Image: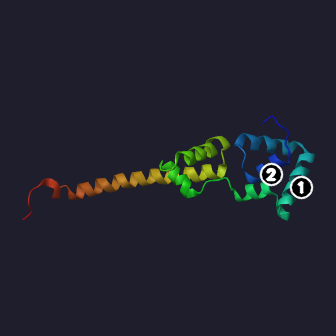
Amino acid sequence: MTTEINRELLHAYLDDSLPESDTAKIEQALRASETLRQQLKVAMQERDRGEHTVGAIWRRERLSCPTREQLGSHLLETLDPNLSQYIAFHLETVACPFCKANFADLKAQQEEAAVHTKTRRSKIFKSSAGLLSGKPRA
């Protein structure tokens, strides 16, 4: 991060919506600068008052974030290509930490389900192998 730490970056820091490297740099700068700590305090007070700008509401409500259902459909590759491209952009380029966490959770659930499905199929096959031999039972 080569830019000056401004009000918007401090709000993004408070939203936990910055990449880890930028967050670490801001924390390091906060330790070293009383002025910056005062600016952070002002930013936190603005939040406590309930900042009502369009940008603040947009960030707070995460209006550009896809729903969990849309993230799941993206994972299953069942979305309209334009929406799928937007979600890929949101996850990879914007790197929204909330959506990345949701997506990782959905992916883990999908992988876990695949393991359980394989185990269940194997168990069913083993239990019905005698029935599938074609020999009539007496």
The type of residue carrying mark 2 is His
The type of residue carrying mark 1 is Val
Residue at x-position 27% and y-position 58%: 124
Q: What residue does disc 1 label?
A: 42
Q: Quadrant of the N terminus?
A: top right
Residues packed near mark 1 inside 10 Å, few (<14), some (14 to 19) or many (20 plus)? some
Residue 125 lies left or right of residue 2; in this view the side is: left
Residue at x-position 80% and y-position 43%: 26
Instruction: Give the image location of residue 112, x and y in percent.
Output: 45, 53
Instruction: Give the image location of residue 28, x and y in percent.
Output: 81, 42
Residues packed near mark 2 inside 10 Å, few (<14), some (14 to 19) or many (20 plus)? some
Q: Which mark is residue 11?
A: 2
Instruction: Give the image location of residue 25, x and y in percent.
Output: 78, 40
* Residue found farthest to the right: 35
Residue 60 lies left or right of residue 42; in this view the side is: left
First in sequence, mark 2 or 1: give its number: 2
Q: Is residue 120 above or below residue 2?
A: below
Number of marks: 2
Q: Which mark is residue 8?
A: none
Residue at x-position 81% and y-position 34%: 2
> Can you tell which quarter of the image residue 24 is in?
top right
